[in-house]
Image: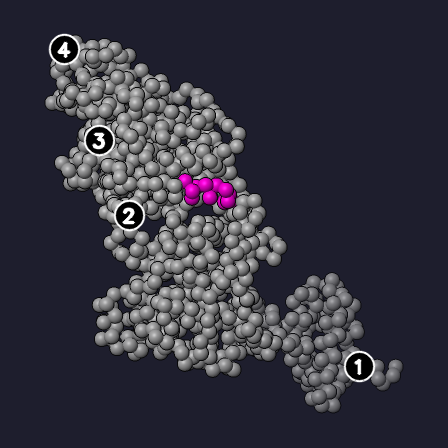
């Protein structure tokens, strides 16, 4: 045997332990020779002699490598081989001294959760790497981004408005009014006001606000509305350079880097002047100089601190801070609401200027004492004269409210849009002609300055089949009269509201007086307009549904008056609608419940915000103030058998030849056809019956349904009516045009146009008849659907049911109000099939003489075409509402067809409560 293969000599002392200590060992866990076939291969190495420490280390490393290889190839060779010999999942591969890793994760030599917990070195390293990568990306982005040329700011184009047939209605050139001025011509008070309100650190910051940016990103990530926080530099970039108002992450990043770049390369004064030259101040004015001219008719350099504070307030959003209103974008932005917003922010900005040291407190106090710096009234572009300006404004408002692209007022003003409207040129012209014809023939400011000055008309016409607004009359001229009278003006609608009460009576029914105020439909009684009887007495004492006397907050009873103080016998709801009696509908509304009446009006298409918030009895006779457009649309719901369609004025919008908006036709079922057709049938009698208050609106050979309305104090008058093809509302009122007059209010119309009193049956129905006759000329003659029977009989408001004549014992039995019940029965002088021949049990007034008690012309019968079996009579003598077939006075056709004024304001506790009782008549 060769010397090289001989077994190494054993140490002379120490035994096996000494030999093991003498042999080199790896630095990790003590190795145990593997069992089985690997032991003979390892044995020769264990006894080798080494010449030094380096050789020993190399030998140890070679040994560890072999063991890892062996355990990997023969891990099943014996029990425990993987654990002790480096094989398997938990050997030297993870805990031994193998090759060092760049990232020690999972951590070597750790067990349990510590194995998966990053070390502080790893965490710190990764954090530094992330920050470094961000800095590198920011550096690249900063170098890559280019500052856009301000001269490339979107050039304003015309917006083209089309009639419904596609022909051009208006091209609103010059909508963008922008005039640049240099820094020297921007007054210090304006610069300071903007800095105090918008960016207090402007002179010192680097062009960005990290906190504001973080807040904006968080809000966008949450899907919430973004808040203000951009610096003046960022707003300048957004307005003048990138011309992008979208709230997106990409736009924010772009804005961020451009802001940083220009802040380091452009003087702060240039940035401030650029911002003020590019900002939108409303009324189509871009830049401070244009805004100064638009609002105060002066150059920007002549502004004082108070005016500067107001113009700065507009930067928050002119839609909600221009005192003239911002209805182009939001109907809620009314002049009243906007003025309150503007005054509040104006005061705040003046106070901020004092706090920042830009304005002495004494000057601030002087401006506050002087009051809000009133801007000029809104002026229209001369190209938008006549009715065109009103049409354009309505189309703008409709598009801005309905488009899903996020297009706002500023973007629309930049132009390039082709807007197809629903307005029909022929109908618009005919509506204007009808109004002007009546105005010129009857209104004379020079002859009657006290009664004929400030007379206004408004009107709107809606297609019941689509909801399209086909015509409006907004006023004399959009460049002279700036309120669109077809929109909401605040004029109460009077008795034109009664059809909604009737619809609620048939849909929701009246409540059972024995049950609580909230009742199911099964517990209520749905009414038949020809069988439900109500008391028509003048000064009727109104009760709650359960018989309790209704009292106002002062404890006063409500005595409901009829127009001209006319009293009627018990009458059907049809008869009450024909002569526009107030008492039956006021009590009916209480029996149904005012919330149900309000809901019926909203379901028909009226806006909830236009309806009176109180639940007073007069709610049912029109103390609310919907617009002519909404009234025409709500009546169109009845015309279309209960199908409600939202009024709209824009059918399509294109830009660059691409369609970006199209009206989506939708409808909802407000009432069943049975209910709506019965309402229509009753309203037909208002026009067709000789005693009907709306008979002046008849159109030969066409079916017409409609209702008159006149309000408390004779401050407004309406006629709203429809045919199967067209629904139109006309209103008349007196209101000062001077918008700067904070105390302006509606004026009474007694004596206006030479009439003792203005009713809906006079000028409004005359205009309606002329317009509708012309507008429908040549159109097919259509008929309304025949109504199906509906509802049940009912006796309300003290009307007596047709029970047998009570015996003496019954008469002596307790009653609800025994002190007011008559003790005798007064038979009628004329034959009648009335359900009751007795007097009203609520009040002691004579109902035995239907012709009146003072020798006037007696009533000879009811409405000639009414299916009711009992004629309404009168007790005030004079021209009887219940009988005279000639219809009464010369200007309206009906002696009672006017104001159901609900009583003179505050007189003897009748009417006039809560600032608007009264209601209306025919």
Up-down: is 465 above or below 374?
above
Q: Residue at x 35, y 37 (%)?
A: 764
Tag 1 residue: 7
Quarter assignment of residue 346: bottom left
Q: Residue at x 22, y 42 (%)?
A: 914
Tag 4 residue: 809
Q: Is residue 434 visible?
A: yes
Q: CA distance from mark 2 to mark 1?
A: 138 Å
Q: Specify the label residue 564 is tagged with.
A: 3
| Quarter of the image that includes the C terminus | top left
Neighbor class of circle 1 (other Cα within 10 Å; few <14, some 14-19, many 20+) is few
Q: Which mark lies nearer to you, 4 or 3?
A: 3
Quarter assignment of residue 360: bottom left
Where residue 664 sits: x, y (%)?
54, 44
Query: Quick check: marks 3 and 2 in contact, CB under 8 Å?
Result: no
Q: Specify the label residue 445 is tagged with.
A: 2
Query: Quick check: marks 4 and 1 in contact, CB under 8 Å?
Result: no
Write the start and end of the magenta stretch as one range.
422-434
- Mark positioned earlier in the residue sequence (3 or 1): 1
């Amino acid at each position: 045997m060769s010397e090289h293969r001989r077994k190494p000599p054993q140490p002379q002392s120490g035994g096996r332990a000494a030999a093991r200590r003498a042999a080199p060992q790896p630095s990790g866990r003590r190795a145990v020779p593997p069992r089985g076939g690997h032991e003979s291969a390892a044995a020769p190495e264990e006894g080798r002699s080494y010449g030094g420490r380096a050789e020993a280390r190399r030998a140890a490393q070679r040994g560890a490598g072999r063991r890892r290889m062996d355990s990997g190839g023969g891990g099943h060779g014996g029990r425990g081989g993987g654990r002790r010999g480096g094989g398997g999942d938990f050997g030297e591969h993870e805990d031994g001294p193998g090759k060092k890793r760049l990232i020690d994760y999972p951590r070597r030599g750790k067990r349990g959760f510590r194995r998966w917990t990053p070390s502080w070195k790893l965490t710190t390293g990764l954090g530094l790497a992330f920050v470094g990568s961000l800095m590198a990306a920011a550096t690249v982005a900063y170098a890559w981004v280019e500052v856009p040329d301000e001269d490339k700011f979107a050039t304003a184009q015309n917006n083209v408005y089309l009639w419904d047939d596609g022909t051009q209605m208006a091209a609103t050139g010059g909508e963008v009014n922008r005039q640049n001025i240099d820094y020297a011509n921007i007054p210090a008070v304006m610069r300071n006001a903007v800095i105090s309100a918008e960016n207090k650190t402007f002179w010192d910051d680097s062009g960005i606000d990290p906190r504001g940016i973080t807040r904006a990103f968080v809000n966008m990530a949450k899907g919430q509305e973004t808040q203000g926080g951009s610096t003046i530099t960022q707003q300048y970039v957004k307005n003048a350079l990138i011309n992008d108002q979208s709230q997106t992450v990409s736009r924010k990043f772009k804005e961020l880097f451009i802001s940083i770049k220009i802040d380091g390369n452009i003087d702060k004064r240039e940035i401030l002047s650029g911002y003020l030259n590019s900002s939108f101040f409303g009324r189509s004015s871009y830049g401070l100089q244009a805004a100064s001219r638009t609002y105060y008719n002066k150059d920007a350099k002549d502004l004082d601190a108070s005016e500067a504070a107001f113009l700065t307030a507009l930067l928050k959003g002119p839609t909600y801070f221009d005192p003239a209103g911002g209805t182009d974008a939001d109907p809620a932005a009314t002049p009243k609401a906007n003025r309150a917003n503007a005054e509040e922010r104006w005061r705040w900005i003046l106070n901020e200027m004092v706090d920042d040291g830009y304005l002495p407190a004494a000057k601030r106090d002087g401006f506050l004492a002087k009051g809000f710096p009133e801007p000029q009234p809104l002026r229209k572009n001369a190209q938008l004269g006549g009715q065109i300006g009103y049409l354009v404004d309505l189309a703008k408002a409709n598009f801005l409210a309905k488009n899903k692209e996020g297009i706002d007022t500023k973007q629309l003003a930049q132009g390039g849009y082709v807007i197809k409207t629903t307005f029909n040129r022929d109908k618009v012209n005919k509506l204007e002609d009808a109004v002007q014809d009546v105005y010129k023939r009857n209104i004379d400011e020079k002859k009657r300055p006290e009664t004929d000055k400030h007379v206004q008309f408004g009107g709107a016409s809606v297609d019941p089949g689509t909801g399209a607004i086909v015509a409006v009359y907004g006023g004399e001229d959009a460049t002279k009269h700036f309120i669109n009278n077809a929109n909401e003006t605040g004029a109460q609608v009077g008795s034109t509201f009664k059809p909604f009460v009737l619809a609620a009576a048939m849909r929701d029914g009246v409540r059972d007086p024995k049950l609580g105020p909230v009742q199911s439909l099964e517990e209520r009684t749905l009414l038949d307009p020809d069988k439900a009887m109500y008391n028509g007495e003048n000064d009727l004492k109104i009760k709650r549904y359960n018989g309790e006397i209704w009292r106002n907050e002062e404890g006063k009873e409500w005595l409901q008056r009829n127009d001209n103080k006319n009293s009627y016998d018990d009458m059907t709801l049809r008869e009450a609608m024909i002569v526009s009696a107030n008492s039956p509908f006021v009590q009916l509304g209480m029996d149904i419940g005012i919330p149900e009446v309000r809901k019926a009006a909203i379901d028909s298409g009226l806006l909830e915000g236009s309806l009176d918030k109180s639940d007073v009895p007069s709610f049912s006779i029109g103390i609310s103030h919907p617009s002519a457009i909404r009234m025409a649309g709500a009546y169109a719901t009845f015309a279309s058998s209960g199908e409600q369609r939202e009024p709209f004025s824009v059918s399509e919008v294109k830009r660059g030849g691409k369609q970006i908006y199209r009206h989506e036709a939708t409808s909802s079922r407000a009432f069943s056809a049975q209910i709506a057709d019965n309402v229509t049938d009753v309203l037909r009698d208002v026009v067709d019956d000789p005693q009907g208050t709306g008979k002046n609106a008849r159109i030969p050979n066409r079916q017409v349904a409609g209702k008159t309305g006149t309000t408390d104090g004779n401050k407004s008058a309406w006629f709203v009516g429809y045919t199967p093809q067209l629904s139109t509302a006309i209103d008349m009122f007196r209101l000062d045009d001077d918008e700067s007059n904070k105390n302006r209010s509606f004026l009474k119309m007694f004596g206006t146009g030479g009439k003792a009193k203005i009713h809906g049956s006079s000028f409004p129905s005359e205009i309606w008849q002329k317009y509708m006759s012309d507008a429908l000329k040549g159109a097919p003659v259509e008929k309304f659907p025949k109504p199906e029977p509906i509802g049940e009989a009912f006796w309300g408001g003290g009307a007596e049911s047709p029970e047998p004549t009570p015996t003496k014992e019954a008469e002596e039995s307790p009653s609800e109000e025994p002190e007011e019940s008559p003790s005798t029965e007064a038979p009628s002088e004329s034959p009648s099939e009335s359900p009751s021949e007795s007097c009203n049990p609520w009040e002691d007034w004579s109902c035995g003489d239907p012709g009146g008690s003072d020798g006037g012309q007696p009533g000879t019968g009811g409405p000639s075409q009414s299916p009711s079996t009992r004629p309404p009579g009168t007790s005030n003598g004079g021209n009887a509402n219940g009988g005279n077939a000639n219809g009464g006075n010369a200007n309206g056709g009906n002696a009672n067809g006017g104001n159901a004024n609900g009583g003179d304001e505050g007189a003897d506790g009748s009417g006039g409560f809560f600032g608007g009782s009264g209601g209306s008549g025919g």
